[in-house]
Amino acid sequence: MNVITVPSSLDDQTFEQVLEQLALLPPDARVLFDARFTTWGSPFGLTSLLTLAQTFTTKPQLIVPEKDDTVSYWARARFFEYAADLFEISGKFPAARAERESGTLLEITPVSRSDDVHTVVERIKDKAAHIITQNLHLESRAVLGFAMTLSEACQNIVEHAGRGGWVAVQNYNWKKRLGRHVVQIAVCDAGMGIRASLESGNRRPLTERWDDGLALETAVIQGTSRFPDHGRGQGFKGIRGYLNKWQGKLTVRSGTARVTMVQPWDEDVPRRDGLSHMPGTQLLIVIPEKVEK
Amino acid sequence: MTPHTIDVCAVLRSAVNQNYGNLLTRDTGMAVRHQIERELAAHREGGITSLDFSSIGMMDYSCADEVVAKLLVLLQNDDITRGGYVVFRGIGDEHLELVESVLTHHGLALVCLCEDGIPRLIGKVSDAERRAWDMVRLRGRAVPADLADEFGFGEEIVARVLDDLSRRRLIRRGTDAFQALDAGDLVQ
């Protein structure tokens, strides 16, 4: 059995450590994810872990976190509800209850059809309106843009992935890290990924250099879709426009690359190539609280 | 002419069989547009239809692209002598930016009756088109000769601009003059 150590804090940055460990193994290796010492998981971390498990031909094992708070949060986030089908789980975890974590806008929710997108937006709209205006101090018109962003992000799974994925939305008070509240949206799938999606529609640019990074820029920055229809590709353009208005961050990872729309409050880099391979597309949006200059 | 109104929210509920009043997802937009197309087909022959968005909650780009942009492309490609005209109503300020972005992406424009009751041109139009459109709107109806002096160019150029506007379904080509889409019965 090959043991993959899940980082103590599992987010979009540290998830790379999981992939780096996996990259050393043959594709058919039996894998055990050891999350005993994991104490925190972001929406991106948890949805990506589910997504990753989908890609195994033999069910991987998962040892749940030892810390009660952590395992309880993962249960309330409905992680185990979906993990039970994808992992052989070792360790105790509580059943998901109806009550919500105070900062949870949307527990981990599967997305595979257009109807799921409607359900997600409808479920989240009232609480999102409250958090966007009260915690993030954005104008009320930002609420509709938030719904649009969530809808377009989820539609990428429906339109392009070729298999279902998950979405989760959480509000945090990043007191130490940023000194303000943020809302995080994670939308992850293990589908064909952006490069294969563009190739499937013969939408690869006429260039000799072609890799996951260029495919990401073609789709996310230039708004090219696998569909030749001129109206396609406006979703990412709309998301970027909304996030630019409110200093929001967008990160899209696909294959071996990730592109990020970096904001002044953030220290991320615009593009990273040569990462360990992960099937599908994983998207992270962070919308920060507005602060007066 | 009797005004014909299509309540987009009612179409949405019937087309996708759900209670949400949100124009979200491309699939939904496609279903809504197909139903609107069927309703419009029954009211063609130069008639004006008001598409009422006032009960719509949320909207995204993909759905707006299907419901607004593709519908306009279809109308513009129709035979000018028999196609219908559409005036959009109830697009709130909160959706205006999104709709305008979708229209600009396609180089399209529409006539929108805003909350103040004044018709506006939304989307991509040239300065000349906007000026000519305003002149026709203020007069209600006009022929190129009526506008040539104020427009500052010859009658021939005005005629060409008005032709373009009618081809884009932003004014109506009548038997003896061009008419504003808000003329008469559509303005409440």
Image (tube, coloured by chain):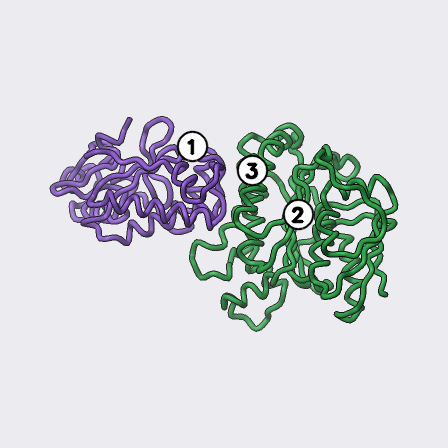
Distance in Å between CA atoms under marks 1 and 3: 15 Å
Q: Are marks 3 and 2 in contact (CB under 8 Å)?
A: no
- Using a 10 Å C-alpha cutoff, classify the residue at mark 2 as few (fewer than 14 neighbours), some (14 to 19) or many (20 or more): many
Q: Amino acid at mark 1?
A: Ser
Which residue is more in the foreground, A90 or A278?
Answer: A90
In the rendered picture, chain A carries what hue? green
Q: Which residue is mark 1?
A: B55
Q: Is residue B80 left or right of residue A38?
A: left
Q: Is residue A155 left or right of residue B39?
A: right
Residue B131 position within the rendered picture, expressed as x and y whole percent measured from the top left: 28, 39
Q: Position of residue B3 (x, y in %)?
A: 24, 34
Where does label 3 land, which residue? A122
Mark in the foreground, 2 or 1: 1
Do marks 1 and 3 share a chain? no
**Chain letter belonging to callout 1:** B
- Give the drawing colour for chain B: purple
Q: Residues within 10 Å of mark 1 (few under 14, many from 20)?
A: some
